[in-house]
Image (spheres, rainbow, N blue to C red):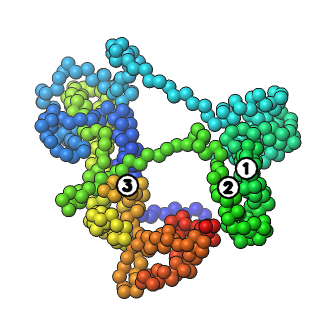
Amino acid sequence: MLKQSLNQKLLQKLSPQQIQFIKLLELTTLNFEEKVEEELMENPALESGKDEGDLSNDSDDSFDYDDGGDDYDSYDKNDDAFDSDLDVSDYLGDDDGGIRLNDQYSGSDEEKEFIPINSTVSFRENLKDQLASALNSDQEEIIADQIIGTLDDDGYLRRPLRSIVNDLLFSSNVRTSEEELESVLKKIHQLDPPGVGARSLQECLLLQIRRKAKTKNTPITKLAELIIEKYMEDFSKKHYARLIKKLDVNEQYLKEAITFIAKLNPKPAGSANDNVKTDYIIPDFVVKEVYGELEVSLNNRNTPELRVSPSYRETLKGYEQAKNPDKSVKDAVQFIKQKLDSAKWFVDSVKQRQNTLLMTMQAIVNFQKEYFLSGDETTLRPMILKDIADRIHMDVSTISRVASSKYVETDFGIFRLKHFFSEGIVTESGEEVSNKEVKKILSDAIDGEDKRKPLTDGKLMDILKEKGYNIARRTVAKYREQMQIPVARLRKELQ
């Protein structure tokens, strides 16, 4: 039997303004600029620039927060300041956000500039051009196109030939066999860059060695080919003693072969990949030392100053003064109020974002002042998100949003904010230090080790204990992995 009852609950719910602020807070400087431009285009009630009365104001603030004085929801109905000749239909008809685009060029011929187009040939197109003269039939051309299209961005063919046979049958209605695919693949293996079309690292290296051996076949190239073809596992794990015994060669001879192999390219298409994207870091903060004091500023770059449009306020006032408004006037008032609300919320959110970012960065600089003055990583203090949250009386999640995606430019380089957060370690003397100090000691010890006999994690642990850091071997291994340093066996080199 269905029972009905009434319950009361208290729930926390984010308002649209809070959601907008959170989204703006997470944006980097570049993304924030794009968001501001997007908002300026979509909302005609939002404008960039200062009011005429503010032109003499030399304030360094990045955003001119103008709430227009009186609230736009209430106006004096007897105010004669509204220009009756203003045609407000221009505002209501602009679905493009108040910006009209004109495809007619109005400048003089001298102002026209023709930008040259950079014409490039992609990696896969280059392969097809090289292969064109080596194919004997239309079917081989279709097969070659399918194989080249299946190559990874680094030039490897990781899809099984059997699957490519099925792909050709379903996509191009071409019946073929693995043997025919193998025949076309061998032709691809002869193309540049050497090693393209390999199905494994071993095959990639062998293709490059054999290509070099055609022009210069020496005992070293023969030994290198033997190592990769027969003893790939021992080579990859740096079991040099085993290789010397199995190949019956001296250490110097083996070293020359390994040096030869090390010069080969494990990613043949890496430099020719047309899908590589370069990410440029734009710092969100700038911290500079000025006469012994640290100054923190936001990097606002080309972000314009924002304000709520005064003309939209006047337009709203004119509509509210209308007598006996019909439905179209009411719709217009609702539309304008909606745009004004949205503009005011956005300006408020931008102002709040600016203040939150500056407060957070200032707290981090104050906490790590010694580091920002010296640049010495060993002076970094243990610091977690809660330390900063408590200092500026904000939630930990807010600090996390700031630290996760922002960068700061200092006198010693550009760093991610996360770089300054670290766990604390207690030394034997009872002093709490940052784990970055421990990582620096590990890094220095590994850099100065004998590469013939690299330091194991156990020996690294002993070095730290001698310096007063009582750390377990598994913790040493964790820090080493965080620094992307391989185990001792893989750091071994032949001298």
Does any portion of residue 49 appear in the rendered image?
yes
Disc 1 element: helix
Q: CA distance from mark 1 to mark 3?
A: 41 Å
Name the mark on residue 209.
Answer: 1
Query: Where 254 sits versus 276, above or below?
Result: below
Q: Earlier in the sequence, mark 2 or mark 1?
A: 1
Residue type at tag 1: Ile
Residue type at tag 2: Ile
- Which part of the image, by quadrant, shows the C terminus? bottom right
Query: Where 16 sits versus 417, above or below?
Result: above
Q: Are marks 2 and 1 in contact (CB under 8 Å)?
A: yes
The residue lying toward the viewer, choosing from 134 and 119, is 134
Name the mark on residue 260.
Answer: none
Q: Quadrant of residue 254?
A: bottom right
Alpha-carbon neighbours of circle 3 within 10 Å: few (<14), some, or many (≥20)?
Answer: some
Disc 2 element: helix
Alpha-carbon neighbours of circle 1 within 10 Å: few (<14), some, or many (≥20)?
Answer: many
Image coordinates of residue 110 in percent, x first then y, are 34, 15
Name the mark on residue 414.
Answer: 3
Q: Quadrant of residue 377?
A: bottom left
Q: CA distance from mark 3 to mark 2?
A: 36 Å
For label 2, the residue is: 261
Image coordinates of residue 325 in percent, x first then y, are 27, 26
The residue lying toward the viewer, choosing from 190 and 255, is 255
Q: Earlier in the sequence, mark 3 or mark 2?
A: 2
